[in-house]
Amino acid sequence: MNAYHFITHWRLDATCEEAYRTLEDVESLARWWPSVYLDVRVLEKGRPGGVGKLVELYTKGWLPYTLRWKFRVAKTDFPNGFSLSAIGDFAGQGVWAFRPLGNGQCVAEYDWKVAAEKPLLKILTPLLRPLFSANHHWAMRMGEKSLKLELMRRNAKTEAERQAVPAPPGPTFPHNLSDNKIFRQSD
């Protein structure tokens, strides 16, 4: 009853390699996708190529609740995609796949099969599934917008071009991100 399955497609002005490298750089997620990623910490680096990397996340959507979860990179296939296994407030599998379109463009697809394990979400899913699903779709729209801005920033040829790229959308219901104990706070 608390399971969800989402498939998201983003058309990007980037190569598969650029999209892959930007999304695998988890340490920068909170900077360029701040509407969703409030804090990200790599707990284990994993093997060369990223398999086994363990990442702790503090995330949110447009609804006024936060999620604490971890993912471990399960498989990598540069530049075609990678998969992860999630535990915590989310439990399940996510798969990023990248397909070239030519002319320096690609499609990024995210296949996310997840169960809401946070007690509040687990209990309310039967009643609020459409709202929780809308929250996910909003987060992914912000991700697409933020990724496009980050790719523009990374591909800028001059500092002036880089500075001209707008800031990514910030979080709704902002949280105090200056607290170093962010993972120990309760909702």
Image (spheres, helix red, strand yellow):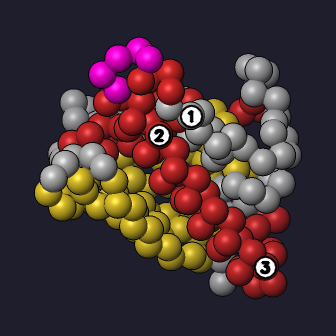
In the image, residue 92 above or below residue 86: below
Type of amino acid at the residue the image marks with label 2: Leu
Pointer 3 residue: 128
Q: Does the magenta-highlighted stretch encompass residue 153?
A: no
Relative image position of residue 143 (x, y in whole percent): 52, 51
In the figure, is residue 178 to the left or right of 76? right
* Image x and y of residue 27, in percent: 47, 28
Boundaries of the magenta span: 156-160
Q: Amino acid at mark 3?
A: Leu
The answer to whether one can see residue 75 in this image is no
Which element carries disc 3, helix, strand or loop? helix
Quadrant assignment, res 131: bottom right
Mark toward the start of the polypeptide (1 vs 3): 3
Let me know if residue 180 appears in the view: yes
Earlier sequence position, callout 2 versus callout 1: 2
Residue 166: numbered disc: 1
Q: Residues within 10 Å of mark 2 (few under 14, many from 20)?
A: many
Give the image location of residue 34, x and y in percent. 63, 38
